[in-house]
């Protein structure tokens, strides 16, 4: 007999193991528009908003998918409810109630704008990944990006994330409202600064000079560091959720118990509500972001590319390989940590130890292939910025060259097998062979780095040493 499907009406039938919203969902107002409601958003920001709803009904989320209707199709029959599994030795299951609307932007543009121009709506968040910012390697808006080209020609119904923000802010200004606060939650260094620049440049390129000045003067883009390991949903998770809760959820999500959200302290009167939910507000988010991106994400990408070449499938399996685990630990302590300087409030050796313990979490099967996606977008922030800093201070880059060489080998192997490569540059990548061909990718490798003979030599040696 199959279990009833999760919804407002069936929630009361769930097994006691399911933690439920301790607030009245019928009273919720939309205070947040989120772009890119993938698993990470639902395991992270939506969880915080669910917490904030316990004290105020102002934190409902309208979740906007830029393309795919999958989320709306899965969650509409469930009234936006889904189950978050926290996977530690004793797992917990929690029904998250903060998603009140699931919109697919191209199908319902006016509904998206209705929220973006609502006086109750104060915060826009995003998890659109690195590529969603549509930037050149120098950090400018990529005017040649097909979605940006579209938004220049037809700004009123945008395609890109910056395009939605510009048009939303334009309508808000026309309605005499203050701008919303944008809190981007993607793994880019200075995500707020980069997004602010992209949005201003798009407004300028659309000929909206006054709008661009208004945005520059009044709109807040708060940088953030987000952290929680979130393996993709699979059928095993669906089955476990159903067995534990007695309800069927078409799209549950899972993460480790650890969850962290650090936001630049520019939220004004909204700060207290975020702080009460456990968000860390700080004036120095850049230091936290850099430490997390370089240590955690840098180590993750290293485990992914080297681990896949060695035949491992998950992070925990790669960490059970003493040679690889030892290499990553040394890379973090000897090569990455010295580029961070002192981070106020962060004990770096303890932070490294905690990350390595999280990677070993036996309750989580985090696939290396998931982390290996989008290498051209991730490696600049995770490894190449670290490498440039190490070179500038005369430190060795021998170990830092290994994940880069492993990525090249990984791409070559996928191409040779005819396997799919998930990356915006996949079409180019699958034709590349050998270090020189990869280093010619100007979208990925800064020319100053490529011109550095020490680093280049290190990449070549690492490449030759890998299978
Ligand atoms: C991972 C991240 O998939 C990846 O590239 O490195 O998603 C990582 O799990 C999170 O940033 C952890 O906060």
Image (spheres, helix red, strand yellow):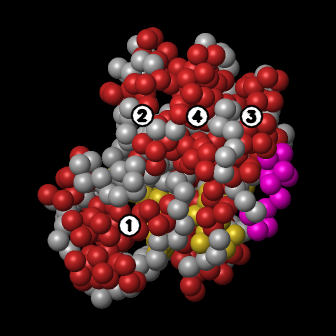
Q: How many marks?
A: 4
Q: Where does the N terminus fall, quadrant-wise? A: top right
Does 11 appear above or below 196? above
Residue 410 appears anywhere in the view = no
Crowding around mark 2 (Cα neighbors within 10 Å: few <14, some 14 to 19, many 20+) is: some
Relative to residue 32, is residue 177 drawn left or right? left
* Residue 149 spot, x, y in % from top left: 20, 52
Residue at screen point 79% across, 47% down: 352
From the viewer's perspective, is the residue at label 1 or at label 2 nearer? 1
Relative to residue 234, is residue 317 drawn left or right? right
From the viewer's perspective, is the residue at label 3 or at label 4 nearer? 4
Crowding around mark 1 (Cα neighbors within 10 Å: few <14, some 14 to 19, many 20+) is: some
Residue under numbered circle 2: 423
Helix, strand or loop at mark 4:
helix
Residue at screen point 47% across, 59% down: 126
Q: Is mark 3 within 8 Å of ligand 1?
A: no
Residue 431, by quadrant, is: top left
Marks 2 and 3, Cα distance to the nearest angstrom? 24 Å
* Residue 263 spot, x, y in % from top left: 61, 69
Crowding around mark 3 (Cα neighbors within 10 Å: few <14, some 14 to 19, many 20+) is: many
Residue under numbered circle 3: 328
Residue 454, numbered label: 4
Q: Is mark 2 within 8 Å of ligand 1?
A: no
Residue 212 appears anywhere in the view = yes
Going from N to C along the chain, the mark reached first, 1 or 3, is: 1
Which residue range is magenta in the image? 343-353
Marks 1 and 3, Cα distance to the nearest angstrom? 34 Å
Does 407 appear above or below 80? above
Going from N to C along the chain, the mark reached first, 2 or 4, is: 2
């Amino acid at each position: 007999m199959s279990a009833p499907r999760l919804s407002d009406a069936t929630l009361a039938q769930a097994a006691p193991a399911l933690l439920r919203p301790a607030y009245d969902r019928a009273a919720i107002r939309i205070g947040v528009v989120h772009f890119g409601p993938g698993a990470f958003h639902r395991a992270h920001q939506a969880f915080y908003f669910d917490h904030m709803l316990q004290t105020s009904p102002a934190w409902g989320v309208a979740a906007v998918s830029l393309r795919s209707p999958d989320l709306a199709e899965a969650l509409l029959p469930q009234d936006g409810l889904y189950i978050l599994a926290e996977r530690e030795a004793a797992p917990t299951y929690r029904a998250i109630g903060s998603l009140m609307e699931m919109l697919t932007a191209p199908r319902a543009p006016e509904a998206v704008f209705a929220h973006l121009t609502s006086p109750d709506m104060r915060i826009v968040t995003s998890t659109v990944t690195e590529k969603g910012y549509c930037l050149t390697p120098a950090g400018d808006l990529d005017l040649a990006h097909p979605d940006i080209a579209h938004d220049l020609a037809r700004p009123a119904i945008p395609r890109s994330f910056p395009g939605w923000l510009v048009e939303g802010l334009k309508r808000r200004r026309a309605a005499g409202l203050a701008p919303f606060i944008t809190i981007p939650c993607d793994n880019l260094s200075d995500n707020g600064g980069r997004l602010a620049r992209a949005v201003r440049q798009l407004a300028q390129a659309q000929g909206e000079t006054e709008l661009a000045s208004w945005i520059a003067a009044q709109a807040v883009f708060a940088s953030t560091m987000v952290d929680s390991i979130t393996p993709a949903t699979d059928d095993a998770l669906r089955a476990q959720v159903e067995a534990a809760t007695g309800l069927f959820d078409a799209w549950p999500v899972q993460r480790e118990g650890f969850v962290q959200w650090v936001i630049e302290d520019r939220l004004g009167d909204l700060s207290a509500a975020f702080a009460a939910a456990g968000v860390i507000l700080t004036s120095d988010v850049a230091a936290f972001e850099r430490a997390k991106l370089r240590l955690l994400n840098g180590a993750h990408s290293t485990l992914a590319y080297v681990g896949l070449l060695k035949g491992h499938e998950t992070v925990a399996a790669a960490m059970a390989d003493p040679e690889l685990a030892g290499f990553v630990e040394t890379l973090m302590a000897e090569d990455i940590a010295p580029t961070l300087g002192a981070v106020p409030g962060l004990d770096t050796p303890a932070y490294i130890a905690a990350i390595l313990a999280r990677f070993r979490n036996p309750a989580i099967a985090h696939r290396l292939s998931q982390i290996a996606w989008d290498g051209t977008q991730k490696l600049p922030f995770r490894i190449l910025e670290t490498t440039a800093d190490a070179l500038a201070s005369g430190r060795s880059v021998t170990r830092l060259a290994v994940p880069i060489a492993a990525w090249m080998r990984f791409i070559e192997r996928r191409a040779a097998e005819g396997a799919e490569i998930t990356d915006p540059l996949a079409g180019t990548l699958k034709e590349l062979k050998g270090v020189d061909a990869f280093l010619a990718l100007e979208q990925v490798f800064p020319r100053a780095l490529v011109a550095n003979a020490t680093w280049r030599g290190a990449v070549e040696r690492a490449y030759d040493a890998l299978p």
